[in-house]
Image (cartoon, grey):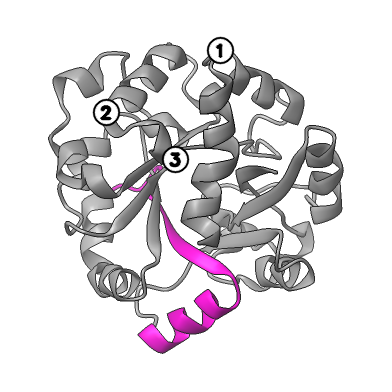
Amino acid sequence: MYVDTHFHIFDRNTIDPGATRYSVNYSASLSTWSSLSRSHNITHGVIIQPSFLGTNNAFLLDAIAQFPDQLKGVGVVDAAISKDALQALKNQGICGVRLNLSEDPNPLRTIDNNQALLEHLYDLDMHLQIHHDDGLLNTLLLNIPHGLKIVIDHFGRPKSNIEFLADHLGIEHHQPNLWVKLSAPYRTPNLDHHSIYKFWLNKIGPSRLLWGSDWPHTRHEAEQNFAEQMQQFFSLTNDQSIKDQILNYNPMALYWS
């Protein structure tokens, strides 16, 4: 069974455009994702709470409740959430919490403001997922406590193909607990994603790599689709055993173990 570790579902009627950095004018249903994913042998998925739904994880939780064996989730929560409330989310299939630091004018302050949350995640054996602007990964990682499981979105979003070769202190600080999603290459079109893939393969090994469709490709809907994202992933390597590991064994170990 294959796993899509990064897709979004939402109802446009629950979006508050005034409370988000961007919005959408359509809905993305679980049934549509299921239809697309099944056609590519995807049987399991990890739903990522989109930023424009804020901390209201109800839509995500309802989807998981319908298919608890096939779906897991990564939520968005308030920095002041209690450990008990976070445990309740974990009991409902939430495996981690996402900090979306993209377009954040002061991402380091945001990390500082979430220190209590990070401690709760560590205590509950949940992971932190981060999305960020290009070129910020190592700086952000150096400001996150050691020992926490961290999942990095979208190849890590370096500014250049050699950035991680020149600066990897933050990566090394968290190397034993770091996973990277080989997702959404269209969000960094200037990069040679094959070379970035090779960096991560050599740095953290094949057991810490994941794949996600990033469906429905918000802000890039017109030029992207599910099939294209799968094809771009398959073009990264000819090694079928690594493909199977990334699509099956790794996500099952992280999200379902």
Residue behind mark 2: 203
Q: x, y (%) of residue 246?
A: 53, 35
Q: x, y (%) of residue 145?
A: 17, 59
> Is 197 in front, or is 114?
197
Q: x, y (%) of residue 77?
A: 46, 70
Amino acid, disc 1: Asn
Separation (CA) of disc 3 from disc 2: 16 Å
For image coordinates 61% across by 70% down, the residue present is 57
> Is 88 in front, or is 136?
88
Asked whether the residues under the numbered discs 3 and 2 touch, taking CB atoms below 8 Å apart as contact, a structural biologist would say no
For image coordinates 76% across by 47% down, the residue present is 25
Viewer can see residue 106: no
Viewer can see residue 194: yes
**What span is colored magenta in the figure?**
82-105
Residue behind mark 1: 238
Q: Which mark is residue 230?
A: none
The secondary element bearing badge 3 is classed as: loop
Left or right: where 64 falls relative to 159? right
For image coordinates 31% across by 21% down, the residue present is 199
Separation (CA) of disc 1 from disc 2: 19 Å
Q: Residue furthest front?
A: 241
Residue behind mark 3: 153
Between circles 3 and 2, the one closer to the viewer is: 2
